[in-house]
Amino acid sequence: MKSCKHDVLTLVKTKDNKLRCRHCHLIITEDELGRSCCPECLETHKISRRDFEKITEEQGNNTRYCCDSCGMVVEY
């Protein structure tokens, strides 16, 4: 099987409003969270925490690209 070198990449922009839990640092979108508590804190520590901070685009950890040749999503 021939491997792709990912020579042609397209930037994937996300407009989701992301939140970071102030306790476990889980990053989740507002749509995924809904009106619920942090799923990681609830599962790991059995504590219902709702203390989040908004993440701006500049604070985002990874930039995502999509390879035009094979369709793979590459994070940098």
Image: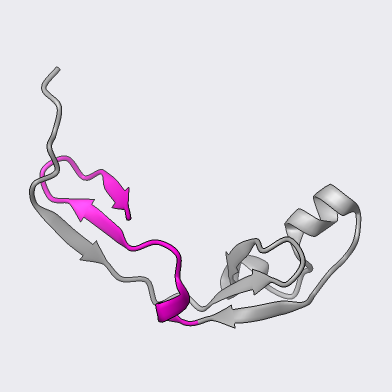
The image shows residue 10 at horizontal and vertical percentages of 17, 60
Is 29 situated left or right of 70 in this image? right
Quarter where residue 14 is shown:
bottom left
Q: Residue furthest top?
A: 1
Q: Is residue 70 left or right of residue 34?
A: left
Q: Is residue 22 above or below residue 7?
A: below
What residue is at 26 percent from the left and 43 percent from the top? 72
- Compared with residue 66, is residue 49 higher up or lower down, i.e. above or below? below
Q: Is residue 5 magenta?
A: no
Is residue 75 in the magenta section? yes
Residue 66, position in %: x, y?
23, 53
Residue at figure coordinates x 84%, y 69% from the top left: 49
Image: 55 above or below 28: below
Residue farthest right in this picture? 46
Q: What is the span of residues highlighted in magenta in the rendered image?
A: 56-76
Which residue is drawn at the image coordinates 65% and 61% (left, top)? 26
Q: Position of residue 36 (x, y in %)?
A: 77, 69
Dividing the picture into quarters, in which one does residue 15 lie? Answer: bottom left
Quadrant in which the N terminus appears = top left
* Front residue of 46 and 59: 59
Left or right? Give the position of 27 relative to 70.
right
- Please, is residue 2 above or below residue 61 in the view? above
